[in-house]
Image: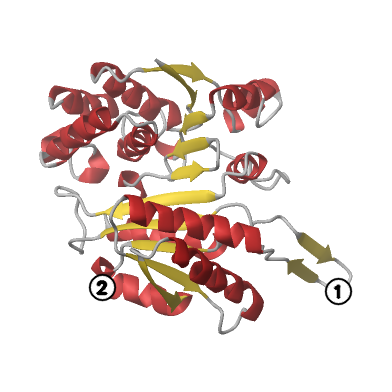
């Protein structure tokens, strides 16, 4: 049995977390949960957004599943997600996007994985504001090391999963220095993976290509801000944030998370769709080498998604969060 840190989060987080726990228990997944929390609820109760007990749990277990977390807005608090990524150097944000039968979308045959650099760029937190002049400067710090790490992660994934091509998204025509760094990283790293082809696309063209012919892409790698935008765009291609998974992976720690919001407007009503958190949990199981358990649960999920009467409201059905989970369990 492996101990995993479980962060339920805020809003709908506890509801979808309970659904995932029930499905994992029914599938006899060999893990035990160590539950800690963060966010608005924790701040209200303990006066701190990220308690030391959570940090200790993460450092002890080195792997976690995280529900959506609310960072108080307008009070000067730094994003909890950004803090965790930077503290533990979870430099690789991995976001698969794949069309699923039963999930409504305008596109077919989308099956791509986006690698977003997770700790640098415009999210480095290097901002200066001159109140007298009314000027705000935000520094997009990009490093050679950071570019090589995220590019290598993308190429390694492509090689391991037999995906033939990596596409680098950039803006080197305008951002001459930062764009050059990630392109140079791709040129250097590609020598280690001769079986993987690579090409590059300017970010605005990349957006157009994704909504025109997304099936042409296999693995995409890019810097932090571009990756943040593209990952949500890719989610939109396959049904939205409610059905896609996400992971933050470093050299010796990984936090898997639902990337949608905490949706406080529907919290406690049994309306939340647990698919995103469940699929993030399945990514976690694959990462842990528990492939048979992950595949079995994914198959049960896909069968359930085909029957609208078994699905939650956002998927076209009438089932509650717990009923949807029970239907998945029935299909295991």
Mark 2 secondary-structure assignment: loop
Labels 2 and 1: the sequence-earlier one: 1
Image quarter where the N terminus lies is top left
Q: Residues within 10 Å of mark 1 (few under 14, many from 20)?
A: few
Residue 122 in sight in this render: no
Query: Residue 284: where, in percent of width, then height?
Result: 39, 34
Query: Residue 248: where, in percent of width, then height?
Result: 50, 43
Query: Residue 26: where, in percent of width, then height?
Result: 24, 17
Residue 177 relative to residue 315: left or right: right
Q: Which residue is mark 2?
A: 213
The single residue placed furthest to the right in the displayed view is 132
Q: Which residue is mark 1?
A: 133
Q: Residue at horizontal 12%, vertical 37%? A: 303
* CA distance for labels 2 and 1: 45 Å
The single residue placed furthest to the bottom in the displayed view is 173
- Of residues 227 and 43, the one drawn nearer to the viewer in this rendering: 227
Query: Residue 95: where, in percent of width, then height?
Result: 40, 51
């Amino acid at each position: 049995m492996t101990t995993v840190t479980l962060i339920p989060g805020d809003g709908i987080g506890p509801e979808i977390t309970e659904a995932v726990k029930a499905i994992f228990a029914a599938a006899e997944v060999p893990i035990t949960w160590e539950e800690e929390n963060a966010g608005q609820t924790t701040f209200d109760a303990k006066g701190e957004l990220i308690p030391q007990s959570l940090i200790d749990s993460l450092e002890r277990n080195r792997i976690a599943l995280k529900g959506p977390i609310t960072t108080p807005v307008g009070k000067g608090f730094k994003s909890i997600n950004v803090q965790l990524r930077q503290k533990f150097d979870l430099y690789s944000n991995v976001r698969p996007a794949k069309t699923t039968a039963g999930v409504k979308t305008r596109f077919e045959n989308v099956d791509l994985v986006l690698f977003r650099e997770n700790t640098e760029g415009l999210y480095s937190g290097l901002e200066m504001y001159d109140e007298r002049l009314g000027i705000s400067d935000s520094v997009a710090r990009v490093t050679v090391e950071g570019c090589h790490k995220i590019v290598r992660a993308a190429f390694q994934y492509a090689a391991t999963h037999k995906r033939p091509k990596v596409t680098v998204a950039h803006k080197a025509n305008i951002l001459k220095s930062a764009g050059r760094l990630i392109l140079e990283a791709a040129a250097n790293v590609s020598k280690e993976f001769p079986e993987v082809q690579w090409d590059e696309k300017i970010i605005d063209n990349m957006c157009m290509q994704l909504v025109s012919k997304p099936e042409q892409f296999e693995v995409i790698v890019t810097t932090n801000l571009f990756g943040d935008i593209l990952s949500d765009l890719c989610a939109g291609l396959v049904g939205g944030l409610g059905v896609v998974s996400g992971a933050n992976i470093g050299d010796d720690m990984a936090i898997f998370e639902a990337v949608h919001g905490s949706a406080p407007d529907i919290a406690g009503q049994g309306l939340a769709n647990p698919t995103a958190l469940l699929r993030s949990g399945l990514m976690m199981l694959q990462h842990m080498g528990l492939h048979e358990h992950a595949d079995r649960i994914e198959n049960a999920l896909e069968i359930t998604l085909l029957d609208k009467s078994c699905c939650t409201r956002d998927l076209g059905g009438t089932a509650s969060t717990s009923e949807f989970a029970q239907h998945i369990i029935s299909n295991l």
